[in-house]
Amino acid sequence: MDPNTPRWGRFAACTAAAALLATGFASAPAYADDDTRHCVITLDAVAPGETSSEVVDRDCAPGEEGRRLQRAATASTLIMTWYQDRNYAGDTADIRKSGGPCDSRGYGISDVGFLWHDEISSFKTWNGCTVTRAYEHSDYGGHFGHYGSDRVVYVGDHINDAISSFRTWNG
Ligand SMILES: [Ca+2]
């Protein structure tokens, strides 16, 4: 047996542990209030025959500037708010769309975008969006969480920090 093999095995294990540790630190909620980031993501209407809404605008700013941005976005209908941490804490994103409230067809967000990949831990839905599915992968793939409430204080261990796409509708 090659005497180098176990050494490489140990090296690989150490690297994996270091990567996990770094991820843990990155998601720890150890920020001051103004270090949070707040976004407004605006979706287009779902085109006939399509299942997803195009993102037509995405704007983020830190702290109070970001909250002002969210308060100013009143021309469209708020359908979701995403939170980086459980209990509606940390970075936030308001998801808005043109037109009226959520209907039974609802909205699909096929990719939450690079800022929000594997980050979301809680969310709220608004304006008639009463049922939501959160998926592990883009384009509604992998395992998912199903929620029949417009207030989800924690998405659950099975999908926490692992969400890449959403569907939400009036059910
Ligand atoms: Ca999180």
Image (cartoon, helix red, strand yellow):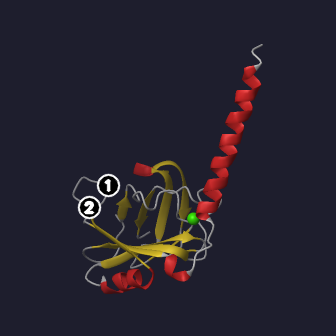
The image quadrant of residue 38 is bottom left
Q: Quadrant of the C terminus?
A: bottom left
Q: Quadrant of ligand 1?
A: bottom right
Q: Is residue 16 above or below residue 70?
A: above
Name the residue at 49% across, 54% down.
135
Left or right placement of residue 112 versus residue 33 in this view: left
In the figure, 96 relative to 9: above or below? below
- 2 or 1: tag closer to the N-terminus: 2
Discs 2, 1 touching: Cβ within 8 Å: yes
Residue 124 shows in the view: no
At horizontal 55% and vertical 77% (from top left) the residue drawn is: 88
| One can see residue 97 in this view | yes
Looking at the picture, how far across and down is residue 146, in whole percent?
54, 61
Pick the residue in front: 101 or 54: 54
160 over 15 or under it: above or below: below
At which x and y percent is residue 7? Answer: 74, 28
The N terminus, quarter of image: top right
CA neighbours of label 2 inside 10 A, class few (<14), some (14 to 19), many (20+):
some
Q: Which residue is mark 2?
A: 46
Give the residue displayed 53% in from the left and 62% down from the top.
119
* Residue identified by numbered label 1: 51
Q: Secondary structure at mark 1?
A: loop
Q: x, y (%) of residue 132?
A: 48, 65
Estimate the spatial distance between the alpha carbons at disc 2 and disc 1, rounded to whole Å.
7 Å
For the residue marked with disc 2, what is the amino acid?
Answer: Val
| Closer-to-camera residue (72/25) | 25
As helix, strand or loop, the secondary structure at mark 2 comes to loop
Would you identify the image quadrant in which residue 166 lies?
bottom left
Tag 1: residue type? Thr
Between 101 and 60, the one nearer to me in the picture: 60
Instruction: Name the outermost residue toward the left.
Output: 48
